Image (cartoon, rainbow, N blue to C red):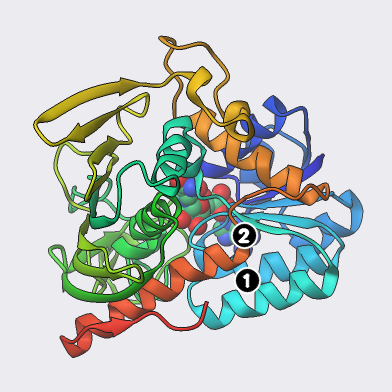
Amino acid sequence: MRAAIIGTGYIGRVHARLIRELGGQVVAACGRTLASAEAFGAGTAYDNVDAMLRSAKPDVVHICSPNHFHKEHAIKAFDAGAHVMCEKPMATNVDDCLHMIEAADRAKRVGAVAYCYRGYPLVRELRRRVQSGDFGVLWRVSGLYLSQDVFDPEKYVWHFTPGTVGDAFALMDYGVHWFDLAEFVTDDRIHDVTANFRTRRPRRLWTGEAGQGPRPPGRILEAGQVAVDVSLEDQADLLINFKSGASGTATIMALSPGNPNHLSLSVDGDKGGFDWLQEQPNSFIERRLGEKCIRERNPDRLHADDRFSAMVPPGHPEGYLDAFRNVIAESWRAMRGEKILYPTFEDGARGVAIVECAVQSAKSHLPAVTQGL
Ligand SMILES: NC(=O)c1ccc[n+]([C@@H]2O[C@H](COP(=O)([O-])OP(=O)(O)OC[C@H]3O[C@@H](n4cnc5c(N)ncnc54)[C@H](O)[C@@H]3O)[C@@H](O)[C@H]2O)c1
């Protein structure tokens, strides 16, 4: 694949590495400034998406820009005839997601979303085992996504600039991953959500350092710093009902000290249960009445269609980058015309739709039903 990357920050660098690992070529990279694209060190540098698409003519565009650009960048990529691998959340609202889906259909191109946690071999094994009835009828589906990324009150990221993330912060940044993981593993759909939101850090200070994005609106202080009021939640506590009748809770928290990426899924059914933690992705706890054991990743146990997701033999740990590579690999296979399960734009739109539901519930203090998608 001849790939172009839009957005040359943290996740853009991850994509560049995995594109090369998969035998692709990064032909172009576009940043907010030419200097950032040049410093990226992969592909021809641009600071203009149109110019990049015109001259680089990529097969696939990897969108790694801030959330509020995903729609514009995806539609331009499709109009230029490229497939799109888009970072999560797919867009800042469901309407934008729907426009992106229309653009993909019009161009007859594939749009995939980087729900990277699907790529772990044990996530796939658990999905198959739930599907085969190993855990019986599911009663409880719960979990956490706890991060400490913005715990420091001095830390400013572009997400705090109004209009960049959408109508939620923790849910758009972390929650969409948990929603997709829970729906993917259980092969079920979240039906309704009752949400409680808290904003623990309501004030942030933009200082103009790298990664903070352009100057936000707000009260300008000395030395050009800007005081920004943050009204979006940094903690979301959710009560969730699934279509099948399973129910549970999820807490999504951006200020959890000591927890960089504590993403967990815990399920109980009428035959057994399991607990999986992203920080130890090569094992899970399997539970039966009166019995609890640790199961290690074993490629031989994987379904034939999932074998590609385990690169090394048991006992050699695989990690985040391997899972991420697997999700890009299957998305590229779909782009090449293979009939294969991959995180589609519809899956991306679902994540954003569930966030919108939670926002509605947090305002009304009533359950909100996920619509459509
Ligand atoms: N899948 C994951 O696990 C994961 C992890 C981190 C980030 N993300 C997502 O990736 C996206 C980027 O996040 P990040 O952490 O890399 O942010 P970042 O701030 O590190 O990088 C953003 C990049 O976008 C570029 N940019 C800004 N405006 C642009 C424009 N108009 N045109 C082209 N480039 C522009 C900036 O130059 C910067 O290089 C977000 O949507 C985020 O939610 C996903």
Which residue is rendered at x = 48% and y = 31% of the image? 121
Residue found 73% across the figure and 70% down from its top = 75
Three-letter amino acid code of the residue under disc 2: Thr
Q: Earlier in the sequence, mark 1 or mark 2?
A: 1
Marking on residue 247:
none
Element assignment for label 1: helix
Please tell me which residue lies in front, 258 or 83: 83
Report crowding for label 2: few under 14, some 14 to 19, many 20 or more residues within 10 A (C-alpha).
Answer: many
In the image, 178: left or right of 53?
A: left
Q: Position of residue 262 (x, y in %)?
A: 25, 40
Q: Which residue has dot 1 on it?
A: 71
Q: Amino acid at mark 1?
A: Lys
Confirm or reject: label 2 Cβ below 8 Å from ligand 1.
Answer: no
Res. 323 visible in picture:
yes
Q: Is residue 77 above or below residue 355?
A: above
Question: The N terminus is located in which quarter?
Answer: top right
Q: Residues within 10 Å of mark 1 (few under 14, many from 20)?
A: many
Counting from the top left corner in percent of width and height, residue 142 is at: 22, 54
Nearest the viewer among 61 and 176 is 176
Relative height, residue 302 to residue 329 (above, below): above
Question: Looking at the image, which residue is at 48% across and 62% down?
Answer: 89
The residue that disc 2 covers is 344
